[in-house]
Image (tube, rainbow, N blue to C red):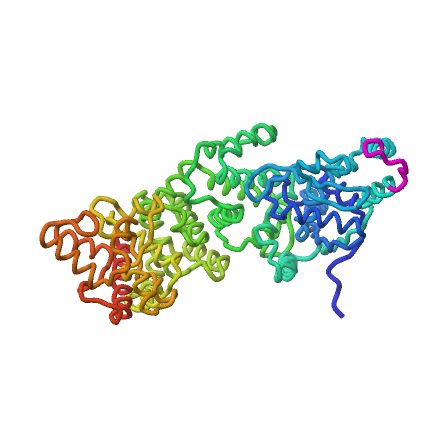
Amino acid sequence: MSIQQYSVNQHPIQTLLTWIKSGEIAIPEIQRPFVWSTTKVRDLIDSLYEGYPIGYLIAWRNPTVKLKDGTSSEGKRVLIDGQQRVTALMAALLDEWIVNKDYKRVKITIAFHPKEKKFEVSNPAIKKDKEWISNIADIFSPDVKVLRFVSDYCEKNEINDQDEIYESIELLRGIVNNHIGLIELNADLDIETVTEIFIRINSQGAVLSQADFAMSKIAANEIYGGNKLRKCIDYFCHLAVAPEFYQQLADVDKEFTSTEYFQKMAWLKNENDNLYDPSYTDMLRVAFTSEFKRGRLQDLVALLSGRNFKTREYEEIIAEQSFKQLEQGLLTFMNETDLKRFVMILRSAGFVESSMIRSQNAINFAYIVYLVLRRDKVEPSEIESHVRKWFVMSVLTGRYSASPESSFDFDIKRICEIGFSDYIKDVEAAELSDAFWHAGLPQQMNTSVASSPYFKVFLASQVHANDKGFLSKKITVRDLITHRGDIHHLFPKNYLKKNGLTRGKYNQISNYVMMQSEINIAIGDKAPAEYFSKLIGHCNNGSESFGAITDIGEIQENFKMHCVPNEMENKTIEHYEEFLIERRKLMAEKIKSYYWRL
């Protein structure tokens, strides 16, 4: 017979809110971005008013840890499912500020119509309408005098019978007495079991990630400053996206602004580079992996809980050391010089615009490589080359697209075992053989997805080589990318459409070039045989045609920059397929040459 690994209890919502305010139960900081819509908050309150169930919350009491005096202690409850519902209740009933998904600090105000017994998200019209109570939080204030509140409402609305209004408002006030189920996982469960439960809970909606789990665990520990670490992560990620958040943070959270963390992130107030704007998941992954030499965030939760991996017991000294180590990893992550230098290295590889980066985990591990090599005091020029190569290799091979945590864990351990220089050579031999460059990569380029990582790397190779735009004399591919230039077709799209080709065929990435719009307009829907013949003829005569190039040698060099196959002046619709095959090979060859020069 299996042993039940949890207990189930019903608690009034008021009790839950009291636990949260007193710190008995740990939830995400209210400053974390809240992803629910305001109408979803309204619907939650309406469900409570109607007496409907709103689901269960799931918490895990921190495991028992050994204290220095030999006794043991249980920690707070860590909420691992139900965070959005709890935050919604705090926002609507307690009038708490929240940060929305756009990093704006807002209040979610729910209005109530006592006569019609309905809820709406408050708005200017409702606030002017005396039949509405524009903010239900007023009703839940400990200072509210209900009889006076009802009397004032009835007087404003010329209502003689106050009983109906009183009953309606008391019913609303009573929702904090509604019970909500709390499934509490046993405190003696090990981290692997809790993680398994966590994964099963979230296998359907995937509303909570391993990073969320870790963040709740961090926030739960005030003894070793986890609550401040949690704010550090959240605030840094806010500021990276919205530098204007700095003054608001300085005004609102005076306690945090006096910490070392705030001083270390203050440089972001003047930073507008968006090439690498890390989320809290990115920041945790990089700080943890670079500092602990592990890649699985469930291991971070275990270590912060005091897990001894050898004895499988929990010890306070391990929890204390792990919080110190995580703090160091976060401070290193936030270092202005290192983060700016890392971004500069990415730009030097040709990735000059955030839309060119399609794998956040590839950029995360590239930063890990940078931090590890910096710690090992590797020469700066060697660091730059290693980071550029590792990032491009990761993107081309999709190294972190399937099981990123397992790949992070494997890679960091191998780097620690044999050193980065030897490891990258092993990876290149296995992943970037001649077969990859001559067959694998061209095959992967058989796609019509413009955001394809292979096309992005091809563009990076052109930026790195300082190539000019297609048929451009002065304007570079870098210029076209950074100024939102257009991607156009070598075989014009309308020409292909007129010949019956579908989107999946005419939008092949091997038909794309970066080209000035005015040149593209001039070419129109002409067959390559027509406009290439005209181009070559005019250049032979020293005159302009499409674009400003007038020299035949210069135009041929431009064709080479863009991997344009030979004899385009003879190609029509019947040559389209062979053109695609040939250009994929040429593009792959250019990327290969670019990679080995990084």
Tell me: residue 175, above or below residue 107. below
Of residue 368 and residue 343, the one placed in the foreground of this image is 343
Give residue 185's quadrant in the image: bottom right
Of residue 348 and residue 84, the one placed in the foreground of this image is 84
Of residue 247 and residue 211, the one placed in the foreground of this image is 247
Residue 146 screen position, x and y as percent: 85, 34
Give residue 122's quadrant in the image: top right
Residue 327 screen position, x and y as percent: 54, 40
Which residue shows up at 25% across the image and 72% down it? 574
Residue 119 screen position, x and y as percent: 74, 45
Residue 70 appears in the rendering: no
Tell me: residue 27, above or below residue 401. above
Q: Quadrant of the N terminus?
A: bottom right
Which residue shows up at 18% across the image and 66% down it? 570
Which residue shows up at 43% across the image and 57% down it? 411
Which residue shows up at 76% across the image and 45% down it? 16
Residue 513: in magenta span: no
Residue 163: in magenta span: yes
Residue that lies at the very extreme toward the left in this rendered image: 541
Residue 330 screen position, x and y as percent: 51, 41
**Extent of the magenta region:** 155-164
Answer left or right for 123 relative to 530. Answer: right
